[in-house]
Image (tube, rainbow, N blue to C red):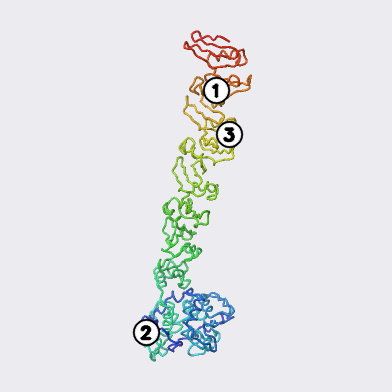
Amino acid sequence: MRTLARITTVLALVASALLLPTTGPEPTDAARAADLSYFDPGNIIADAVFFDSLAVDVPTVQAFLNAKGASCVAGEQPCLKDYRQTTATQAGDAYCSTYTGAADETAAAIIVKVGQACGINPRVLIVLLQKEQGLVTGTRPATIRYTKATGFACPDTAACNPEFSGFASQVYFAARQFQRYAANVAGSYRAGRNNTVLYNPNSACGSSQVYIQNKATAGLYSYTPYQPNAAALAAGYGTGDSCSSYGNRNFWNYFTDWFGSTQSAGGSAILDRYTAAGGPSGALGATTSAIGCGIRDGGCYQHYARGSIYWSPATGARALTGSVETRYGQLGWENGGLGFPTMDTWCGLTGGACFQEFQGGSLYAAGPAATAFLVRGGIRDKWGTTGWETGYLGLPTSDENCGLRNGGCFSAFQNGLVYYTPATGAVVVRSAVVAGWARLGFENGLLGYPTADTVCGLAAGGCSQEFQGGALFTSSSTAPQFVRGGIREAWQASGGVTGPLAYPTGDENCGLRSGGCFQTFTGGSVYWSPSTGAQVVRDPVYSRWAGLGWESGPLGYPTNSTFCGLRDGGCGQHFERGSLYWSTASGARLVRGAIRDAWAASGWETGPLGYPTSDENCGLAAGGCFETFTGGSVYWTPGTGARLVTGQLLTAWAAGGYETGRLGYPVENQRTASTGVVTQRFQGGTLTYDPQSGAVTGG
């Protein structure tokens, strides 16, 4: 394998020029012949075209060689279309990356691989092979044509340097030499200034000042240091006069005939944009790559020490810098989801943040060196409605992440998330509720995806969010909790966050007796069962019900919600097996069964009994039970039913020993005659009260 160190001493021996008009036949289709009136000695070929190493692939080059060499007959060597060579690996350096050798490589493969390794358009190398040795269209090729295929290190005045003999070596080191010219470490001609260029090796033929516009043209003159005179240009592919030279004319002719214009709109636009940015001393710094074209959508690019410029016909030339450029590269450059940039990187956002728009989305970064994140599509549009980076979401803190359930995607921002699905569209989830949703498993949990943006500004600094499976509510003093179904309906019916229950303080809890569920709130709870529905339970009733064992206690589930505003500011609630009534004076008392029915028949708390002052008490004689009220008592036995005993009759009955005395249990409720006399029958007799005398008799 040749080493680069052995080469450096002979690079000055590069060939000067071909003085013959052409070494291959002229194009057979005269209608396609290049119009040399457009030949520009200062811009023979654009940098963007010359250095476009991605212009063609191996199959394309092979097909071209097959077509141009269709009539070739093998001579000492095969025709170029059939040529093969086992190549050695060539280590990379500052001008070419490593060329990896392989067995039995075709000429097409060698040309393309060298072009990619050294950053030279493979079409340029094809034209070089043609103009130097006629290898593309010639027939019966001699060995010498492959030995000095590109004329590298083969000066007109001396023998070729054998160090560079052979097809692969000639192609590789010619390409490498053009990069050395571009780096201004070799060659006599320079871009961006006037250069004296001869018409012929005979200095008597004269010269002219040529303003060489680009590195590719300067490289062609360093490789073949003559310009065509008027006679050479007028002759097409033919012979001019004694002062004519043909190397650079033939290069332009062949390239134009075979591949089209030597100029590139994209390359020119990139150069203009780079110049406008200050060139090497500007924000982008020195170039670190050639202009590359032939990328997606006919685009071009060039990289620099501190950025890049990308161009496409649809977007123009746009500069990328800082972390935005870095992220663009990580995402696959123009072949990623972003496509081409549609504006330059701009870092004039609030706080020095940067952004850049692309065909397929945007990149935003908190600063030139901060990580840039991708935001696009419906998520980007939704973010825009919140005020972009100056809105309540702030800047993105993640790329768009897709592949979620049901085609979902999301992006994270400084103060929340934006989620998208085809069914729900893009929805904002603010930080206030994110933790609650996360705790429940995000979109894979019981709430599913959000269906509406987070709403804040509720009572007590609260926020809420609707989801497919319910809603989350939070406040300045309560963590996010979900509400749904019947419990949510009962809560909202009670006034929601502005009602007596206020905010949920826990999630829905199920698995209770008979398939029940409950949820706690700041001001109480909501309990639900299949048979009773959802009912609000709140103090002063709730604490007493809890003390009785909640739904597992004697009362079971509530059958209606706690109701207040009763006589004397009282409250009450009915349950499956009884009721609880509360007043300031009596506290919360349990009343149930026949005793409750008798109390209800008497008018509840507005009747003569008023509020209960004790719970039901059982274990009396004959299986009896009783309960005391503000205005009397109710006694019950299986044989007598529930009977009210009030006033003077209750006092007298009590004095006689209640149910254990001679009278036993009451068997009817009190009766009041038109005269005001009150009587009540008991098992053992009757008591009568005369309001006129104030006496109780009987018994």
Label annotation for residue 174: none
Q: What residue is shown with label 2?
A: 208
Q: Depth check: 233 or 27 in front?
A: 27
Q: Depth check: 391 or 202 in front?
A: 391
Q: In the drawing, does residue 679 fall left or right of residue 353?
A: right
Task: For label 2, count other residues whose C-alpha is less than 10 Å away and answer few (under 14), some (14-19) or many (20+).
Answer: few
Q: Dot 1 lies on which element?
A: loop
In this rendering, does residue 318 appear at all? yes
Mark closer to the chain start, 2 or 1: 2
Residue 346 at what x, y percent from top left? 42, 61
Residue 614 at what x, y percent from top left? 56, 23
Q: Depth check: 50 or 501 in front?
A: 501
Q: CA distance from mark 1 to mark 3?
A: 23 Å
Q: What residue is shown with label 3?
A: 551
Residue 604 at what x, y percent from top left? 50, 24
- What amino acid type is highlighted by mark number 1? Thr
Residue most extreme to the front:
639
Q: Is residue 103 above or below residue 354?
A: below
Q: What residue is shown with label 1?
A: 613
Q: Is residue 185 above or below residue 590?
A: below
Residue 79 at what x, y percent from top left? 52, 85
Q: Quadrant of the C terminus?
A: top right
Residue most extreme to the top:
693
- What amino acid type is highlighted by mark number 2? Ser
Mark closer to the chain start, 2 or 3: 2
Q: CA distance from mark 2 to mark 3?
A: 106 Å
- What amino acid type is highlighted by mark number 3? Glu
Q: Nearer the viewer, mark 1 or mark 3?
A: 3
